[in-house]
């Protein structure tokens, strides 16, 4: 059932012993919104904990102390996750079709897998939706909570550069800044720092870039060999996805990452008016208009060929080529 903000707040207020989950390969929004919600619930003296796949180093510090809690979960809440198929948890034993009591999300592609869903598709980040619910619950936004929310919102807006940034997004971020968090320091960590391994894989990824479809599509491939050569963790490679669409004239930027041999995780980033989620849908994925994802099993050549075929189809249908 789709519920509104007040109903979501009421549900959370009535719950205790809560496990918070988010999507696999969690980004700053998944981590930030999960941690902020957990901290907010704990402020109300509720038992809450998070269970996430390993986060990137720049986000992992937010999870400190939140993964443990001596209780059996009675309720499960998922954030920033459009489909239960992409839920990811710490540890291995997890049923992906587990009953989720409440989902808080901002993906237009949400499939309403949870018993109750609060979906704000206008929110730039799940963290923006979580911020609204926390204030509806009259939870005090401490510096600690604000930092988590700020990381979520700044991640999904590319530090307030993307078109999903609304006046409300900026106001929510300003509310976070009001708590006294160090915006400059957080932005430096999140957006202005590269590990040596990342710098190395970025170099290889850029060297792999090819353009197709009259220069309207650019593809970079991170092969399994490159992962081995640089020793980089998959969670650290997220910023690569924004590179191909930065090229002038490119409408669709595609990043294919072969973490396991023969299995490609595909990130699609578009420029107006191309629609990334339409392309991802053909490969069983989804997301937003400007950012979507899917996966493909097979050879590198087939992976590129298939994704280009669907990209061409979508661009043709919309008269963009
Ligand atoms: Mn998000």
Image (spheres, rainbow, N blue to C red):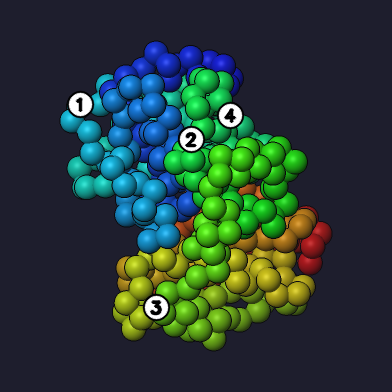
Label 1 vs 4, first from the N-terminus: 1
> Which x, y percent locates residue 215?
73, 77
Q: Which mark is residue 142?
A: 2
Residue at the image position 42 percent from the left and 16 percent from the top? 13
Secondary structure of the residue carrying numbered label 3:
helix
Work out whether 108 lies above or below 46: below
The extreme bottom residue here reads 207
| Residue underneath mark 1 | 72
> Which x, y percent locates residue 184?
58, 59
* Ligand 1 lies under 8 Å from the Cβ of mark 3: no
- Between label 4 and label 2, give the one nearer the viewer: 2
Q: Which mark is residue 197?
A: 3
Secondary structure of the residue carrying numbered label 2:
loop
- In the image shown, does 147 or 59 lie closer to the viewer? 147
Quarter of the image for residue 224 reads bottom left
Label 4 vs 2, first from the N-terminus: 4
Q: Residues within 10 Å of mark 4 (few under 14, many from 20)?
A: some
Label 3 vs 2, first from the N-terminus: 2
Residue at the image position 32 percent from the left and 77 percent from the top? 231
Measure how far apart labels 1 and 4 are at the Cα level.
28 Å
- Between label 1 and label 4, give the one nearer the viewer: 4
Measure how far apart labels 4 and 3 are at the Cα level.
37 Å
């Amino acid at each position: 059932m789709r519920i509104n903000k007040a109903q979501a707040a009421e549900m959370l207020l009535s719950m205790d012993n809560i496990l918070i989950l988010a999507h696999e390969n969690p980004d700053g929004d998944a981590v930030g919104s999960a941690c902020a919600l957990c901290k907010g619930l704990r402020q109300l003296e509720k038992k809450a904990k998070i269970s996430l796949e390993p986060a990137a180093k720049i986000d992992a510090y937010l999870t400190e102390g939140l993964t443990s809690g001596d209780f059996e979960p009675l309720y499960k809440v998922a954030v920033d996750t459009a489909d239960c198929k992409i839920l990811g948890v710490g540890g291995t034993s997890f049923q992906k079709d587990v009953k989720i009591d409440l989902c808080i999300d901002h993906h237009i592609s949400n499939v309403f897998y949870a018993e109750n869903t609060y979906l704000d598709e206008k929110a730039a980040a799940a963290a923006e939706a979580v911020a609204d619910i926390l204030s509806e619950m009259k939870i005090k936004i401490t510096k600690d909570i604000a930092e988590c929310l700020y990381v979520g919102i700044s991640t999904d807006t590319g530090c307030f550069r993307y078109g999903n940034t609304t006046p409300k997004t900026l106001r929510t971020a300003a509310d976070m800044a009001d708590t006294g968090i160090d915006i400059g320091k957080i932005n430096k960590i999140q957006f202005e720092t590269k590990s040596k391994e990342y710098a190395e894989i970025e170099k290889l990824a850029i060297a792999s870039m090819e353009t197709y479809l009259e220069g309207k599509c650019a593809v970079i491939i991170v092969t399994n060999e490159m992962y081995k050569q640089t020793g980089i963790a998959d969670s650290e490679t997220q910023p690569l996805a924004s590179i191909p669409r930065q090229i002038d004239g490119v409408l669709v930027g595609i990043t294919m990452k072969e973490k396991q041999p023969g299995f490609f995780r595909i990130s699609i980033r578009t420029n107006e008016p191309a629609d990334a989620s339409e392309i991802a849908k053909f490969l069983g994925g989804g997301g937003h208009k400007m950012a979507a994802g899917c996966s493909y099993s097979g050879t590198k050549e087939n992976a590129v060929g298939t994704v280009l075929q669907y990209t061409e189809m979508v661009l043709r249908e919309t008269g963009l080529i």
